[in-house]
Amino acid sequence: MNKKERMYIEIEKHGKEIIKYFNLKDQNPLDISKKLFSLERKMHRACEAYCNGTISEGELDIVEVNILSKVKGVLGSLHGIFINHDPRGYALKLNISNFYMKDFGGYGILAPNFKEGG
């Protein structure tokens, strides 16, 4: 098995955990993971831009509302989801400690980057 195949196995495993946690029916774990990762990247970029002073707090708030709306559209709920504004880590987090992928603080990572090893 090559590196790309292992990565897709991890993405699918993570997607299945998301489906289980949010009680989603008839969803493709790869599709869920890809949609959430796209939203993670957008929110992370906005947090970086705010930290660097290239967007205002108001602009960050607009991005946040937009991203959370789209996350809710994918998952049907925002239960346990919060935004980490520190650009040194993942932006979309879960306030649960027993999730498959966690950060150093013990919070669940909604959309990890498996290309970088999680």
Image (cartoon, grey):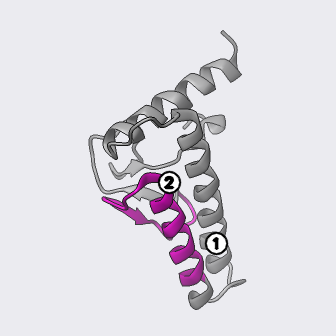
Which numbered circle lies on residue 46?
A: 1
The reply to whether residue 3 is in sight is yes
Q: Residue furthest front?
A: 26
Which numbered circle lies on residue 74?
A: 2
- At x 51%, y 34%, the residue is 29
Q: Is residue 57 above or below residue 29?
A: below
Given this view, does label 1 or label 2 mark the residue nearer the observer?
2
Left or right: where 65 falls relative to 24: right
* Spot occupied by residue 17 in the image (x, y as percentages of width and height): 39, 35
Q: CA distance from mark 1 to mark 2?
A: 20 Å
Q: Is residue 17 above or below residue 84?
A: above
Task: Let me know if residue 62 is in the magenta part.
Answer: yes
The reply to whether residue 86 is in sight is no
Give, as a three-letter code, the residue at label 1: Ala
Left or right: where 85 falls relative to 52: left
Q: Which residues are magenta?
A: 60-89
* Spot occupied by residue 78 in the image (x, y as percentages of width and height): 37, 62
* Spot occupied by residue 89 in the image (x, y as percentages of width and height): 53, 57
What secondary structure is found at the residue carrying circle 1?
helix
Question: Within 10 angstroms of label 1, few (less than 14), some, or many (20 or more) residues?
Answer: many
